[in-house]
Each structure stands twice: as structure tokens, then as C-alpha cells.
Amino acid sequence: MLTPQYVKASIDGRIGRIRLNRPERYNALNRAMIREIVEAMERFDQDETVAVIVLNGEGKSFSAGADIEEMVDATPVSMELLDPFADWDRISRLHKPLIAAVHGFVLGGGFELALACDLIYATPETQFAFPEVGLGVMPGAGGTQRLTKRIGRTRALEWLWTGDRMPASEAQQLGIINRIVEADQLEAHVLTVAERIAAQPVMSVRLIKDAVDKAGNLSLQDGMDHERRNFYLLFGTNDQTEGMQAFVEKRQPTFKGN
Ligand code: CAA
């Protein structure tokens, strides 16, 4: 693998950190940058020392979206042959919790990247938008699907058709983001949440994400059947034995992550 050019990736305790690092372009996402982000995520997803992955942007903003200059001369054929969004699909296949800490502009592909994460924390000044309509295109990396699943068709269409900027307060009201945190506390807050999740039994965290993901795609009964299989599976883990034994013995559990 080549040295990443557009992201900084590091491990901090049990947290895999990925920082978008193209601040002079508002972290506009070119194809190489997306590939670097996805490769760092996949590396952390398979690294047993990492429990949670945290994503944030360097500079004034999280990301102003896909790199427009890279797409300006594209044709349907070049798009079809390159399939620039194929790498994005790999994010949905990750098993570990992904947390986005966002600030400034979260636009277009930047918004799609945040929506592909499991939890989103934002500063009060953060502005979200899908400005693609004003470029004569539309979101292409999941925006129409993920936004609609989050807030429903009627509201999604209004944001997508107008391209208006959605303030963090409204994004929170709509259930798009988890919480608003002051800029100087955002990183510490997100790391605290990440560490809390990292301290939980690994297999529970993993199978909860797996079951919650099914809620969007399966019927209620199929989703519940899937949930139940995950529940039964957890009785094969040492952490289930320890968690329940500790409760019965009235002591704190010590989880081993298996
Ligand atoms: N692609 C490429 N370059 C970008 C960019 C983008 N998405 N966003 C910003 N930049 C570049 C600018 O061209 C500029 O470069 P130069 O210094 O070389 O001129 C630099 O970043 C700074 O930007 P501005 O001078 O425009 O800064 P500003 O403070 O006046 O405005 C902004 C900031 C509101 C983010 C504005 O740059 C902007 O509107 N950017 C485009 C946002 C956008 O339309 N995003 C959607 C992209 S399409 C997409 O994402 C499709 C998809 O579904 C994946």
C-alpha cells in the first residue's frame, strides 16, 4: 500500500483515528482520498487492537464533498468504467462502530460520508447540505437513500431539491446527528463515547450493529428472527459468561473481547 496522501490514520488506545487531510480544498474528496479513507477503515476493521473508528476533518470543515474538478469533464461512459462510488460501498460492510465528528461544511459527498457512519457528532456551527442539484447532478454515493431512510421522503426531497444548508440544530431535530457539542469539546466528547463503546463486550457491539442494520432492509419478523440468532450466538462468548456471572456474584465484569 502507498503512503496515504490525503488522510492521516493513527491508533489512539483502542480507537482508530482517520483525519481527512486536504484542508486547502475543504477536504474535497477525490477518488484517491476516498480509497485512502476506505482502506484505513478496512485496516482498522481487521485490527484486533482497534475497537472503534473515529473520523474527522482537518482545517475549517469536515468536507465540501466530492472533488468537482475531478468530475468536470466526466462522461457517462467514463463514470461507468471508473465506477468512482464503488469504493464507498465497502464502508457498509465494516463491522466496527464508525463515529463521525464533523464541523464547518458537511456538503455533498462529505454529508454522504458522515451518513455512512454509525454515529455523528457536530459543532453548533456545522452546516449540512446536498448542493449537487445546483451543479446539474445529484448525490451519487448514497445521499438520496440514506437521507430518505433517516428523515422520510417528503423532507428528504425538500433538502435535495433546494440544496439548502441545514443547520446542526435542525439536523439534530431530524435525528440525522446524535448530538451537538461545542467545537473545543468535540474531539474529547467523541473520544469519550468511543472509549465507552470500546470498553463494551466486542461481540455484543458487533452483533448489535449487525442486527440494527437489518432493521432498514428486512421485514419486522425477519429482522426479529435475525436479532434472535445473534442473541443466541452471544451465549457462545466468554464475555456473556463473564457478564452474567459477574451480575450474579455482584461484582464488576472484566471483559476479554471474545
Ligand atoms: N471540489 C473541488 N474543489 C473544491 C470543492 C469541491 N467540492 N470545494 C471547495 N473546493 C476548493 C475551491 O475550488 C477552492 O480552491 P482554490 O483555492 O484552488 O480556488 C478551495 O477549495 C477553497 O474554496 P472556496 O474558495 O470556494 O472557499 P469558500 O469559503 O468561498 O467556499 C464552500 C467554501 C462553500 C465549501 C465552496 O467551496 C463550495 O460550495 N464548494 C462546493 C460544494 C459542493 O458543491 N459540493 C458537492 C460536490 S458534488 C458531490 O459531492 C457528489 C456526490 O454525491 C459524491
Image (spheres, helix red, strand yellow):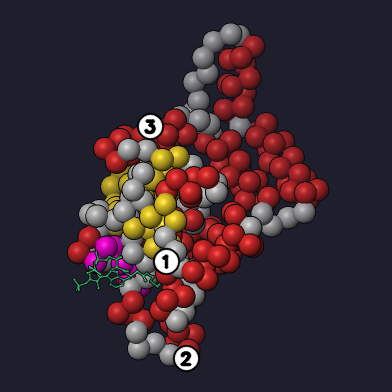
Name above or below for residue 71 compared with residue 252: below
Q: Earlier in the sequence, mark 3 or mark 1?
A: 1
Q: Please identify the quadrant where the N terminus is shown.
A: bottom left
What's the distance in space between the residues labelled 2 and 1, CA to CA?
A: 22 Å
Which residue in the structure is indicated by mark 2? 77
Which residue in the structure is indicated by mark 1? 108
Instruction: Indicate the quadrant where residue 130 lies.
Output: bottom left
Q: Residue at x 52, y 36 (%)?
A: 202
As rendered, which of 1 and 121 lies closer to the eye? 121
* Amino acid beneath label 3: Thr
Residue 200: say if magenta. Answer: no
Q: Residue at x 34, y 48 (%)?
A: 125
As rendered, which of 219 and 177 lies closer to the eye? 177
For label 3, the crowd category at 10 Å Cα-Cα, with few meaning under 14, some 14 to 19 and many 20 or more, is few
As rendered, which of 88 and 95 lies closer to the eye? 88
Which residue in the structure is indicated by mark 3? 192
* Amino acid beneath label 2: Val
150 sits to left or right of 44:
right
Estimate the x, y position of residue 16 in percent, counting from the top left.
Answer: 35, 45
Depth check, mark 3 against mark 1: the one in front is 1
Q: Label 1 CB, ligand 1: below 8 Å?
A: yes
Query: What secondary structure do most residues of the magenta stretch adopt?
Result: loop
Q: Residue at x 49, y 45 (%)?
A: 172
Q: Check the image and name the residue furthest to the left.
A: 24
Estimate the x, y position of residue 53 in percent, counting from the top left.
Answer: 40, 46
* Amino acid beneath label 1: Gly
